[in-house]
Amino acid sequence: MFRKDLIPLLLEHPITVTEISRFVEQSGKDTLADLEHLLKSIRHSEFKAQVEPAECRKCNFQFGTDKLRKPSKCPECKSTWITEPRISLHRA
């Protein structure tokens, strides 16, 4: 899979790394590396990335937008009930 093939998949609707890896039939680690590279390279293109951060479903703690993988547990309440971050692209 080419990284540029991820652009139509991410355009206008948020999707998680797990959903992307299932769709492209690739391991999560490889998908994450491709996605991180794509997000760095689109800085010089017509697209802008938007990351919806991971969030604890128990206490609503929001993690930073710099992490694309789901955290293992919440630093506030120690719960493992956490949503995965969602990534989308929009035309600038």
Image (cartoon, rainbow, N blue to C red):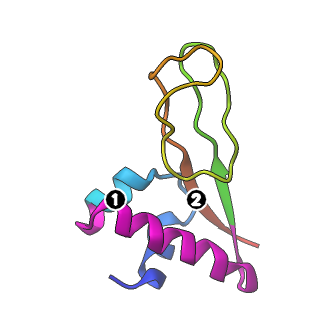
Q: Nearer the viewer, residue 70 or 3?
A: 70
Callout 1 amino acid: Gly
Residue at the location (49% across, 32% down)?
Answer: 83
Please name the predominant secondary structure of the magenta segment in the image: helix
Q: Indicate the quadrant containing the N terminus: top left, top right, bottom left or bottom right.
A: bottom left
Query: How far apart are labels 1 and 2 at the CA level?
Result: 17 Å
Q: Which residues are magenta?
A: 23-48
**9 sits to left or right of 37:** left
Q: Residues within 10 Å of mark 2 (few under 14, many from 20)?
A: many
Across and down, in percent, residue 77 comes to 59, 13
Indicate the secondary structure of the residue bearing disc 1: helix
* Relative to 53, residue 68 above or below: below
Q: Are marks 1 and 2 in contact (CB under 8 Å)?
A: no
Q: Nearer the viewer, residue 56 or 78?
A: 78
Q: Nearer the viewer, residue 42 or 75?
A: 75
Instruction: Name the quadrant containing residue 20.
Output: bottom left
Callout 2 amino acid: Ser
Q: Give the numbered dot on residue 88.
A: 2
Across and down, in percent, residue 58 comes to 55, 13
Q: Give the numbered dot on residue 28.
A: 1
